[in-house]
Amino acid sequence: MTITKRTVADQIAAYLHHELTLDQLVDWSERAMNDGEFLEQDATTLSFVIARLGVADVRAFGLTWEDCEELLHRLGFAPHVEIVTA
């Protein structure tokens, strides 16, 4: 499976939209590191971001909004927040 910057950004977005739990995001990132193929030109960035997601379930690391924002920026994306009535 080829992992792209978009693939990783979509996983972070799914987490932020509560479509994935933190455990599911961590599991995905561990599988991606072990089984995924990265495009050579993006390998350094993808490895960094995916490795960071892989330790997000460790209390010392966690995963804050700011972390997600920074990781998305590394991937070339920016989060967009929209406030709607509940």
Image (cartoon, grey):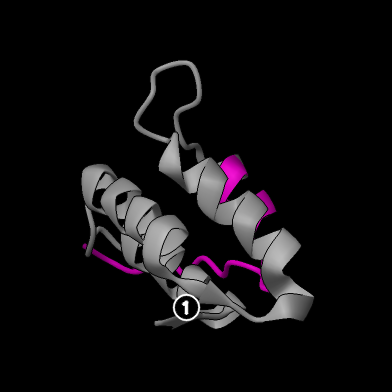
| Disc 1, SS | helix
User: Residue 79: within the magenta?
Assistant: yes
Furthest toward the top, the residue is: 60
| Badge 1: residue crowd in 10 Å (few <14, some 14–19, many ≥20) | few
**Amino acid beneath label 1:** Thr
Is residue 52 in view?
yes
Q: Position of residue 35 (x, y in %)?
A: 38, 66
User: Between 85 and 19, which is closer to the camera in this rendering?
Assistant: 19
Q: Position of residue 84 (x, y in %)?
A: 34, 69
User: Between 25 and 84, which is closer to the camera in this rendering?
Assistant: 25
Q: Position of residue 45 (x, y in %)?
A: 72, 61
Work out whether 35 lies above or below 64. Answer: below
Q: Is residue 40 left or right of residue 71?
A: right
Q: Residue at x 39, y 18 (%)?
A: 59
Q: Residue at x 23, y 59 (%)?
A: 20
Is residue 83 in view?
no
Work out whether 36 lies above or below 69. Answer: below
Which picture quadrant has residue 39? bottom right
Q: Is residue 36 left or right of residue 39?
A: left
User: Residue 16: within the magenta?
Assistant: no
Q: Residue at x 21, y 62 (%)?
A: 86
Work out whether 51 lies above or below 57. Answer: below
Which quadrant is home to the N terminus? Answer: bottom left
Tell me the residue that label 1 is attached to: 7
Q: Position of residue 74 (x, y in %)?
A: 73, 61
User: Between 7 and 68, which is closer to the camera in this rendering?
Assistant: 7
Q: Is residue 47 left or right of residue 17?
A: right
Q: Residue at x 28, y 44 (%)?
A: 22
| Span of residues in magenta | 67-86
